[in-house]
Image (cartoon, helix red, strand yellow):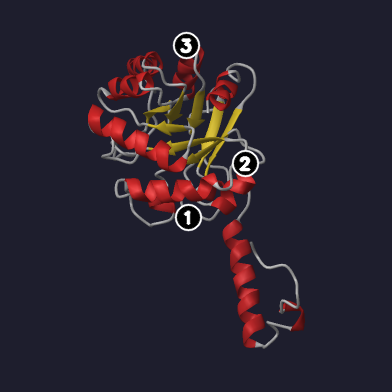
Amino acid sequence: MIKKINKILLKKNKSKIVCLTAYSKSIAKILDKYVDIVLVGDSMANVLYGHKNTHKISLENIIQHTLSVKLGIKKSLLVVDMPKGSYNNFKSAEKNAKLIIKKTKCDAIKIENYKNNHRIINLLTKKKIPVMGHIGYTPQFKKKFKLEGKTKRESDKLLKEAKLIEEAGAFSIVIECLSPTSAKLITNKLSIPTIGIGSSSHCDGQVLVTDDMLGISGFYPKFVKKYVNLNRIIEKAVEKYTKDVKQNKFPSLINFLNGSKRRK
């Protein structure tokens, strides 16, 4: 855990940090070959469960998906979102953070900033619980999806939030939907890495929802680059399978086991 976190810290101002989300072993296994951080995000509420926001994901949901993701991880830092309502106060934050780490063996948890959440981060880090912060657009607490830090006043406020999170002991911070100017300012002023999402290339690293960049989520804000239209590829495969079944082309003799290896 500590070695992996130190590797992330050492990347500050040296090499870009790559982060993507995963909710299952199969995806995590692919990501682990290339990324530095795998995030089990509460974005699963939208991506997997079809909710309009991230609010309805439970601690149990997060833990179960993390258990699956953990099976596919060998080298990447595994970070887990603490769901909304699981860190309302010091007592619940400590209890639930410890539960997530104990059950999943993840490397760190992530907390979105709201009011005085830096104090909760400070409590957790004092208990030797590694924490990733999150400022800007925080889906658990803000309804409107908009760019922040466009004015000097906004930018200074965001910098203050970021500094409080750093001082609280967080090892890194996600900055979401910030103006390039604000993202650059915060990245330059902090000694811990910034992981951007919709916040320009000035950040120390980048994170995207994997399903967005693969083109299968149906949600593509401006800051997302679709690297493939996997939705169409899956459609074509399902169409071909359906055709083969209806025309009695599948299964053929070659598809029977005949002593071949079973899935493990």
Specify whether 61 is left or right of 254: left
Q: In which quarter of the image is the C terminus?
A: bottom right
Name which of mark 3 and mark 2 comes first in the sequence. Answer: 2
On screen, 221 above or below 146? below
Name the secondary structure under disc 3: helix
Question: Which residue: 62% across, 41% down?
Answer: 32
Name which of mark 1 and mark 3 comes first in the sequence. Answer: 3
Residue denoted by label 2: 32
Residue 245 appears at what percent x and percent y? 63, 83
Name the secondary structure under disc 2: loop
Query: Which of 261/114 is in front?
Result: 261
Residue 215 appears at what percent x and percent y? 56, 53
Alpha-carbon distance for marks 1 and 2? Answer: 24 Å
Name which of mark 1 and mark 2 comes first in the sequence. Answer: 2
Which label sits on residue 189?
3
Residue 106 appears at what percent x and percent y? 48, 37
Mark 1 is on which residue type? Answer: Gly
State whether residue 195 appears in this view. yes
Residue denoted by label 1: 218
Alpha-carbon distance for marks 1 and 3? Answer: 36 Å
Mark 2 is on which residue type? Answer: Asp
Circle 1/circle 2 CB separation < 8 Å: no
Question: Which residue: 44% across, 53% down?
Answer: 47
Q: Nearer the viewer, mark 3 or mark 2?
A: 2
Other-residue count near label 3 (Cα within 10 Å), few / some / many at <14 / 14–19 / ≥20: few
Residue 26 appears at what percent x and percent y? 58, 53
